């Protein structure tokens, strides 16, 4: 049974940083892309960042490029999202995701595996 378990969310002030973690288990992810999505109240879930598990190729949404960094630790089966210079508009539930198709991950929300989400709140 595949499990993606997020942690690291919380309440911070604008300009501060948070690091989210996603611990993956239940299958081999070497051929998968791991990603982060977010969903703000009243809005659709949107793509944030993705990384290929084996090659390390990385893609970001324009809204977070230069502020967020995605990485993975293959030995720990964990993916991270370092979020710097946080803004109130970054407030959302952040979801970890895994899929074998990076195009599907970047362009849709029809993702194979989802985590349960972790709340990130940024106050002005």
Image: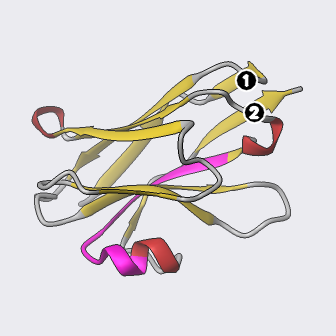
Residue identified by numbered label 1: 11
Q: Position of residue 33 (x, y in %)?
A: 27, 63
Residue pointed to by mark 2? 121
Secondary structure state at the residue bearing disc 2: strand
Q: Nearer the viewer, residue 37 or 15?
A: 15
Please indicate whether residue 45 sits to the left or right of residue 69 in the image: right
Residue at the limit of the structure toward the right, as seen here? 124
In this orientation, which residue lies closer to the viewer: 55 or 20?
A: 55
Q: Can I make out residue 116 in this image?
A: no
Q: Is residue 14 above or below residue 34?
A: above
Magenta residues (range): 93-104
Colouring: secondary structure
The answer to whether the residue labelled 1 contacts the one labelled 2, judged by CB atoms less than 8 Å apart, is yes
What kind of element bears circle 1? strand
| First in sequence: mark 1 vs mark 2 | 1
Q: Which mark is residue 60?
A: none
In the rendered image, residue 98 lying in the magenta stretch gets the answer yes
The quarter of the picture where residue 90 lies is top right
């Amino acid at each position: 049974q595949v499990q993606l378990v997020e942690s690291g969310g919380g309440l911070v002030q604008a300009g501060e940083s948070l690091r989210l973690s996603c611990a993956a288990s239940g299958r081999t992810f070497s051929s998968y892309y791991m990603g982060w999505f977010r969903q703000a109240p009243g809005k659709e879930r949107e793509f944030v960042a993705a990384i290929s598990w084996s090659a390390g190729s990385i893609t970001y949404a324009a809204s977070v490029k230069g502020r967020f960094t995605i990485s993975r630790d293959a030995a720990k089966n964990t993916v991270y999202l370092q979020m710097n210079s946080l803004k109130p508009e970054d407030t959302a539930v952040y979801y970890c995701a895994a899929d074998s198709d990076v195009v599907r991950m970047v362009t849709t929300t029809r993702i194979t595996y989802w985590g349960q989400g972790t709340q990130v709140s940024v106050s002005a």
